[in-house]
């Protein structure tokens, strides 16, 4: 009993100390030495959990320079983010795919205007077990595997696949709420959301795909490039033949547009109303200016110069 | 009506009682092939069940400590989240967020849960259909998945009638609804377990019903009620899914407040870090699990101390 009490008391003390030490004083912080920054206000970002690892460091860096501004980042998913965004509850929406027609309509109805800005490139990477002799796969062969009601259950059943091993397919993929799932099914099966359903659904936890595929001879899965980058010794990335020969996922092939159809862009959608506020405009400009550095640090692929110029032009136009 | 008019009522009852007694006695006295063997087998099964539960907990603890040990330092408590410097990032805003949200939950479930239980046990007329309807609903609500409460919270608390926005108080209210059935059921059991002689004694001495409840029944039921509250709070502190719906974010650097600004909690933060590709975030998530265990242990040990305090006082 006494031990428990001591434990409880020391924890309470630790918590109290944490609370005191961390008290951020919001008032009068604009005049501190932040390069003469006078900006203040709250910015709320919500949306894709894939884009959050970009928005978080962007927010962190910006707040270091502008201590008067607080930025919070949520991860409701691309769809959930747009739902709140078009309800006027957030200022910027993170998205791992472009806005859809029904979401567009919801925004229009609420009178919310917005602009689509690219912040990074990503390669949807198809990974297999390192012992698998297959190196390259065509989009059609991917479709044979992943299309709805697909009956392919062994690698040797895939039409025209070279070096196919005699191993049972063990498929891993994200949940249906994921923007990655939307993009992959659209690119491979030709229709968003159309997929076979008897795969190991890992939900939002792509690390389960890493564990699953690296532990199963016939394993196959797909996710963003950063998860492959961190697990290169336990996974093998397949080259993708989109019609013009085999192309491996890499920053170069994504940026020059040859990694098709699985190269994708990640977006932020700031609202026009929010951009009228100086701190939001300043943050969005800051985000785009530093997008490439942030993307590479977070394991994504930076924007091309062309994309940066385009995004900057859009921001300039919006801000008028 | 009578089955056998030749037999008088009293004799028939006696016969039935004797029969029932004989059957029960026969069942109890029946010697199995090896009662000792059966007893041993049953004990082994029970130990196996306990062993499974403990093994799960042990595995979680060992994994968290092995993985999170390099990150166990003061930064965990003093620093906020950071994607730029994960090696020094901490859970300050998440710990405070959890404490705020759970504080709100306790403030709501104690009066509401205990009040509902007192009404249902001591005042409600159980022959009325509406009281039976309430009872049935409380029992059913205990089995509703937590995400449903999240949607309810989003529609009625964050937006809709209450419209308080995506704030910590909305999280408290949603989680309070989630655990309220558990608390009510446990509090009712505790109140029901108070011997009727205590109530009758108080009433016989001239106490009103409210005086009886407040001075005699409630103090005697407090240990049981606290057990229910501990269970409810333990469930609430670990919830992430309904909180994501009512506005918990994954990155917030300023300390939370109940009615203003976004908040985050420990499970949400751990979930976010565990899903990142980089190993350094996995360490952070494991360290977060340890932090959460410490917070939970602190809250529970206080409640257990409170319960023991009342138990001693009564005996």
Image (cartoon, helix red, strand yellow):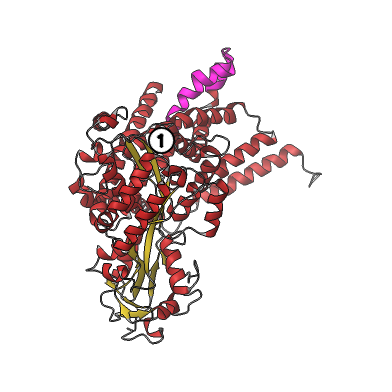
In this view, the residue farthest toward the top is: B206
Q: Which of B299 and A235 is in front in this view?
A: A235
Residue at 59 percent across and 31 percent down: it is B120
Residue at 55 percent across and 25 percent down: it is B196
Q: Is residue A256 left or right of residue A94?
A: left
Q: In this view, does B127 lie to the left or right of B64?
A: right
How far across and down, in percent of the image, does residue B127 sit? 69, 33
**Element on which disc 1 rests:** loop
- Is B132 drawn above or below residue A239 in the view shown? above
Label 1 sits on residue? B261
Q: In this view, does B142 lie to the left or right of A57?
A: right
Range of residues picked out in magenta: B198-224
Q: Mark 1 lies on which chain?
A: B
Q: Quadrant of the C terminus of chain B?
A: top left
How far across and down, in percent of the image, does residue A224 sit? 34, 63
Which of the 4 image quarters holds residue A95?
bottom left
Q: Nearer the viewer, residue B15 or A73?
A: A73
How far across and down, in percent of the image, does residue B81 sit? 28, 43
Residue at 36 percent across and 56 percent down: it is A311
Q: Does the magenta stretch include residue B120?
A: no
């Amino acid at each position: 009993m006494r031990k428990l009490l001591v434990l409880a008391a020391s924890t309470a003390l630790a918590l109290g100390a944490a609370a005191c030490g961390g008290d951020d004083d919001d008032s009068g912080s604009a005049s501190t030495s932040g390069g003469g920054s006078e900006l203040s206000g709250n910015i709320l970002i919500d949306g894709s959990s894939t884009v959050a690892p970009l928005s978080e460091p962007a927010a962190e860096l910006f707040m270091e320079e502008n201590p008067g501004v607080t930025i919070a980042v949520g991860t409701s998913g691309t769809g959930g983010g747009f739902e709140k965004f078009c309800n006027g509850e957030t200022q910027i929406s993170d998205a791992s795919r472009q806005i859809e027609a029904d979401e567009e309509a919801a925004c229009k109805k609420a009178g919310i205007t917005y602009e689509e800005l690219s912040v990074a490139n990503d390669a949807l990477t198809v990974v297999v077990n390192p012992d698998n002799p297959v190196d390259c796969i065509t989009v059609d062969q991917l479709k044979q595997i992943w299309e709805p009601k697909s009956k392919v259950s062994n690698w040797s059943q895939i039409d025209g696949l070279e070096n196919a091993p005699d191993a049972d397919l063990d498929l891993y993929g994200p949940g249906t709420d994921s923007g990655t799932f939307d993009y992959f099914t659209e690119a491979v099966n030709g229709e968003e959301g159309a997929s076979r359903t008897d795969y190991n659904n890992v939900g939002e936890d792509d690390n389960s795909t890493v564990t699953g595929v690296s532990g199963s001879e016939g394993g196959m899965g797909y996710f963003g490039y950063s998860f492959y980058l961190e697990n290169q010794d336990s996974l093998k990335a397949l080259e993708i033949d989109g019609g013009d020969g085999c192309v491996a996922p890499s920053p170069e092939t994504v940026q020059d547009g040859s990694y098709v159809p699985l190269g994708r862009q990640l977006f932020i959608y700031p609202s026009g109303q929010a951009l009228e506020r100086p701190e939001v405009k300043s943050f969005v400009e800051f985000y785009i200016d530093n997008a490439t550095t942030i993307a590479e640090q977070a394991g994504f692929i930076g924007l091309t110069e062309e994309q940066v110029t385009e995004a900057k032009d859009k921001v300039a136009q919006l801000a008028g | 009506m009578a089955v056998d008019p030749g037999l008088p009522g009293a004799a028939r009852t006696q016969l039935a009682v004797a029969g029932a007694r004989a059957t029960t006695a026969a069942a109890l006295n029946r010697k199995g092939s090896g009662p000792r063997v059966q007893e041993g087998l049953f004990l082994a099964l029970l130990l196996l069940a306990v062993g499974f539960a403990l093994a799960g907990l042990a595995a979680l603890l060992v994994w968290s400590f092995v993985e999170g040990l390099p990150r166990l330092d003061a930064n965990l408590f003093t620093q906020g989240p950071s994607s730029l410097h994960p090696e020094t990032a901490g859970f300050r805003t998440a710990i405070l967020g959890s404490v705020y949200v759970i504080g709100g939950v306790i403030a709501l479930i104690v009066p509401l849960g205990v009040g509902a239980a007192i009404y249902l046990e001591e005042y409600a007329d159980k022959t009325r259909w509406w009281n039976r309807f309430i009872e049935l609903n409380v029992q059913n609500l205990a089995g509703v998945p937590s995400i449903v409460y999240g949607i309810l919270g989003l529609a009625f608390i964050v937006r809709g009638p209450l419209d308080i926005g995506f704030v910590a108080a909305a999280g408290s209210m949603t989680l309070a609804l989630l655990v309220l059935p558990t608390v009510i059921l446990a509090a009712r059991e505790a109140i029901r377990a108070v011997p009727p002689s205590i109530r009758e004694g108080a009433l016989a001495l001239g106490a009103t019903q409210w005086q009886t409840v407040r001075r005699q029944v409630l103090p005697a039921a407090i240990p049981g009620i606290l057990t229910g509250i501990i269970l409810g709070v333990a469930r609430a502190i670990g919830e992430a899914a309904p909180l994501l719906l009512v506005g918990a974010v994954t990155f917030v650097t300023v300390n939370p407040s109940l009615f203003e600004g976004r908040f985050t909690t420990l499970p949400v933060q751990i979930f976010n870090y565990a899903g990142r590709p980089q190993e350094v975030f996995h360490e952070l998530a494991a360290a977060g699990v340890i932090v959460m265990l410490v917070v939970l242990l602190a809250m529970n040990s206080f409640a257990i101390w409170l319960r023991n305090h009342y138990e001693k006082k009564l005996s």
